[in-house]
Image: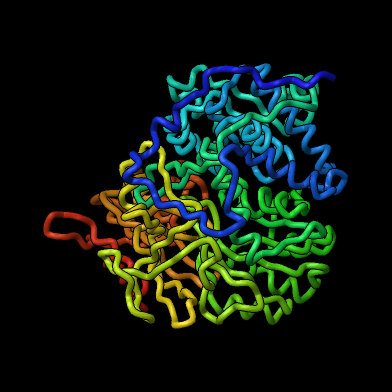
């Protein structure tokens, strides 16, 4: 077949025109040799070019129980999808493509095809409900949505509720025996397996990564092709150090930048392969699959590692050599439990959607108990006071980070809260020792991190307040040995409402119906009043103190 070039058209400047003013941008530093990236770069093309130059064309990239694709086969499928999006659907560089699906070969192909075509990938969590998807659609204004067939109902509801999304085209993938004639796979099969990747500038936009933020209103972190490639040259190069012989698996969704890096971009950069399961992970199933598929690198949250430890001791872990923990604080007890059960020293790390991936971490041989690690080469991190001045060793303060990636929000007034004087403030409190190790202390905002998921307390409060029995409420995180934190709701009921277990369950079910299930309050405490300031502002810090008190108020 003849090579098909992406049609020449005026690019869509929607995202570029909604970036913060230059004075609010983070300072970006590229002061290491490996970070000297070209001015023109398409991240997906660069990853494939690197793999082909290293002789990996016939090595497996994607593995599942249904199929295995080599790097060359994957590239052909990516070309086909790019042709569907640009030739058949007429999308132009800069158009947004919403992606909705769990971790699968099809979801990974959709992301790669989107970005190679010069389009902006907007990946969304598979558990999101129509209301949450609607907020993302309103902000991103996608031209096309690519959705796993099993997850299309909530997306259809979200699109139908937004008058501005009337022209958004929906294509499903992983369609199975239904709607196969109109699926993304069916359309792609009719297109050429070659195309000309969009000649993007390194500073062109590759993806929007949505995070709830502390208020529950979605924030979109903007990342360029250069951000993706720069991230490959930092933590993966200096800490992870994967090889082409590695087989990677894990639980973080591709919609998280933690999952996108760990389970797609970074394995491609290393010439490794990724296994995507056909079943939902449980701790025992993950341990058994690690052994069966010969996985050598695993990504998941501390909660899962803790639950996996007993099964790892029972079944063994085969060839596993690296276990990476991120997404929530790693208790040292969990790290030692895992090490005792497996003999593996866990790699911990802290990153942020706004920074794309991990910027503080240590390789197994450099781990220090209780510490997340040292700053990753390419970044600089400090513990500072409220004025941004560095604090003495051992004092607790705010974490500030600078490096080759940084926060650029889409059309967002909260940009100035995250970036100050060129430095990024992820919203965490840390202390640093004399050897440069960073010790996590707490969040400095209202974000709750439970089992690796970010939950905004105000968002859960807003959902609870929609229930007719609720007069007022406050939602905070409570320390939990298994999940790191759980969502705890303090609720004041309206007069005449029963403060009993049935009421608590009704409120929990109400939140589950309106928000992603992981956001529901696992504990509901009924109180007669909430702590407030003289001006009536809810004092969440007081609720957090109560949550950590041995006695819970009633």
The scheme the figure's colours follow is rainbow
On the image, which quarter does residue 502 sit in?
bottom left
Q: Quadrant of the C terminus?
A: bottom left
Res. 483 in view: no
Which of 410 and 166 lies nearest the eye of the viewer?
A: 410
At 40% from the left and 68% from the top, the residue drawn is: 382
Classify 515 as above or below 172.
below
Classify 48 as above or below 529.
above
Which residue reaches farthest left?
534
At 46% from the left and 38% from the top, the residue drawn is: 132
* Rendered location of residue 490, percent (x, y): 33, 60
* Rendered location of residue 112, percent (x, y): 67, 37
* Rendered location of residue 31, percent (x, y): 51, 58
Which of 370 and 550 lies nearest the eye of the viewer?
A: 370
Res. 70 in view: yes
Q: Quadrant of the N terminus?
A: top right
At 37% from the left and 57% from the top, the residue drawn is: 423
Which residue reaches farthest right?
58
Which of 503 and 519 lies nearest the eye of the viewer?
A: 519
* Rendered location of residue 409, percent (x, y): 41, 43
Total number of numbered labels? 0
Residue 241 falls left or right of residue 253? right
Which of 540 and 406 lies nearest the eye of the viewer?
A: 406
At 57% from the left and 22% from the top, the residue drawn is: 92
On the image, which quarter does residue 538 sit in?
bottom left
């Amino acid at each position: 077949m003849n090579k098909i070039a992406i049609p020449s058209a005026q690019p869509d400047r929607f995202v570029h025109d909604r970036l913060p003013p230059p004075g609010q941008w983070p300072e970006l530093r590229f002061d290491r040799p490996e970070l000297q990236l070209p001015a023109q770069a398409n991240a997906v093309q660069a990853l494939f070019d690197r793999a082909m130059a290293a002789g990996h064309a016939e090595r497996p990239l994607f593995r599942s129980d249904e199929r295995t694709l080599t790097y060359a086969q994957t590239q052909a499928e990516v070309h086909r999808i790019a042709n569907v999006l640009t030739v058949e659907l007429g999308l132009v560089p800069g158009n947004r493509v919403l992606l909705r699906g769990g971790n699968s070969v099809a979801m990974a192909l959709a992301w790669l095809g989107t970005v190679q075509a010069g389009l902006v990938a907007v990946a969304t969590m598979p558990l999101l409900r129509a209301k949450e998807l609607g907020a993302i659609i309103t902000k991103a204004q996608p031209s096309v949505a690519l959705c796993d067939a099993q997850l299309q109902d909530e997306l259809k509801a979200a699109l139908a509720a937004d008058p501005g999304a009337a022209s958004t085209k929906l294509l499903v993938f992983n369609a199975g025996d239904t709607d196969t004639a109109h699926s993304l796979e069916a359309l792609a099969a009719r297109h050429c397996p070659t195309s000309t990747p969009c000649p993007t500038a390194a500073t062109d936009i590759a993806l929007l990564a949505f995070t709830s933020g502390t208020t529950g209103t979605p924030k979109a972190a903007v990342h360029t092709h250069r951000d993706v490639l720069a991230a490959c040259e930092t933590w993966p190069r200096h800490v992870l150090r994967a090889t082409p012989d590695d087989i990677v698996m894990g639980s973080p969704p591709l919609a998280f930048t933690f999952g996108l890096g760990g389970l797609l971009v970074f394995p491609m950069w290393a010439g490794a392969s990724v296994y995507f399961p056909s079943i939902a992970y449980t701790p025992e199933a993950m341990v058994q699959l690690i052994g069966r598929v010969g996985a050598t690198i695993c990504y998941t949250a501390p909660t899962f590692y803790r639950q996996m430890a007993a099964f790892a001791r029972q079944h063994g872990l085969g060839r596993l050599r690296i276990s990476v923990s991120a997404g929530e604080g790693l208790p040292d007890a969990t790290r030692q439990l895992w090490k005792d059960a497996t003999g593996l020293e866990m790699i911990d790390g802290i990153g942020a959607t706004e920074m794309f991936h991990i910027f503080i971490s240590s390789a197994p041989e450099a781990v220090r108990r209780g510490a997340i690690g040292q700053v990753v080469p390419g970044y600089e991190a400090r513990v500072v006071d409220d004025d941004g001045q560095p604090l003495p060793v051992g004092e607790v303060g705010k974490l500030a980070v600078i490096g080759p990636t940084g926060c650029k929000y889409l059309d967002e007034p909260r940009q100035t809260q995250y970036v100050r004087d060129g430095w990024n403030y992820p919203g965490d409190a840390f202390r640093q020792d004399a050897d440069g190790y960073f010790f996590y202390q707490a969040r400095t905002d209202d974000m709750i991190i439970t089992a690796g998921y970010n939950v905004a307390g105000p968002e859960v409060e807003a959902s609870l307040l929609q229930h007719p029995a609720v007069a007022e409420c406050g939602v905070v995180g409570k320390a939990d040995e298994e999940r790191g934190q759980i969502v705890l709701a303090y609720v004041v009921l309206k007069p005449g409402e029963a403060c009993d277990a049935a009421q608590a369950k009704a409120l929990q079910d109400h939140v589950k119906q309106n928000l992603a299930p992981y956001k529901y309050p696992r504990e509901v405490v009924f109180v007669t009043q909430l702590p407030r300031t003289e001006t009536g502002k809810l004092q969440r810090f007081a609720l957090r103190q109560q949550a950590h008190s041995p006695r819970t108020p009633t």
